[in-house]
Image (spheres, helix red, strand yellow):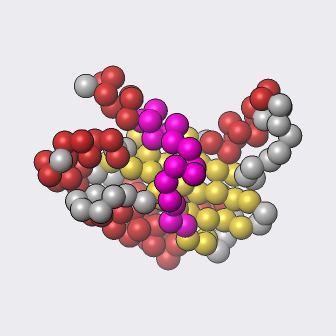
Amino acid sequence: MKKLLIGALLGFLALPAAAQDAVTYPFDGSFEDATFSVESAIIGRGLVIDYVSHTGDMLNRTGTDVGSDKMLFEGADIFLFCSAQLSREVMEADPMNIAHCPYGIFVTAKDGEVLIGHRTYPEGEMQKVETLLTEIIQDAIDG
């Protein structure tokens, strides 16, 4: 079970950006304010953040190691979490919906623009997850 959850987490982190669509929303504030707002909105729903991936820091730190001098983001974090209730609901409908867990909300800062977003999910039961993510992001934006 633990290996399956780790595999799902690594699979989420390894997905190339072009492989699926993302929904983004502009945030009127700093990257730090946006990450605080997202964290607060997730916790405010009674959910536990399993992991925060500081993807922007990693990309900036390792760029020269892989032969690149291009800065992709001034900041980029991904918040990973699950909802026990919603996850059970969507996995009872189709156990293979485990492939979409944990759920993630990302915050990016690039060229003075701060965005909050999430990847899109397939039609059907997973639209309930997409609705939850959209609601959390709206809570974060509204402050």
Residue 20 inside the magenta-drawn segment = yes
The N terminus lies in quadrant? top left
The residue closer to the viewer here, 122 or 92, is 122
Instruction: Write the residue at 43% across / 60% down.
Output: 120
Count of picture labels: 0
Residue 2 image position (x, y, % from top left): 30, 24
Instruction: Write the residue at 75% across / 49% down.
Output: 72
Residue 51 image position (x, y, % from top left): 46, 40
Residue 87 image position (x, y, % from top left): 24, 49
Instruction: Write the residue at 77% across / 66% down.
Output: 112
Q: Residue furthest front?
A: 19
Q: Image check: 83 left or right of 51?
A: left
The residue closer to the viewer here, 105 or 16, is 16
Q: Is residue 141 above or below residue 93?
A: below
The residue closer to the viewer here, 121 or 74, is 121
Q: Does residue 139 appear in this view? A: yes
Q: Residue furthest left?
A: 92
Residue 55 inside the magenta-drawn segment = no
Q: Residue furthest top?
A: 3
Q: Image quadrant of residue 67?
A: top right
Residue 76 image position (x, y, % from top left): 64, 50
Q: Does residue 129 appear in this view? A: no
Q: Is residue 87 above or below residue 4?
A: below
Q: Is residue 70 above or below residue 20?
A: above
Q: Image check: 50 left or right of 82?
A: right
What's drawn in magenta, residue-wise?
9-24
The residue closer to the viewer here, 121 or 138, is 121
Instruction: Write the residue at 33% across / 31% down.
Output: 5
Q: Image check: 25 left or right of 32?
A: left
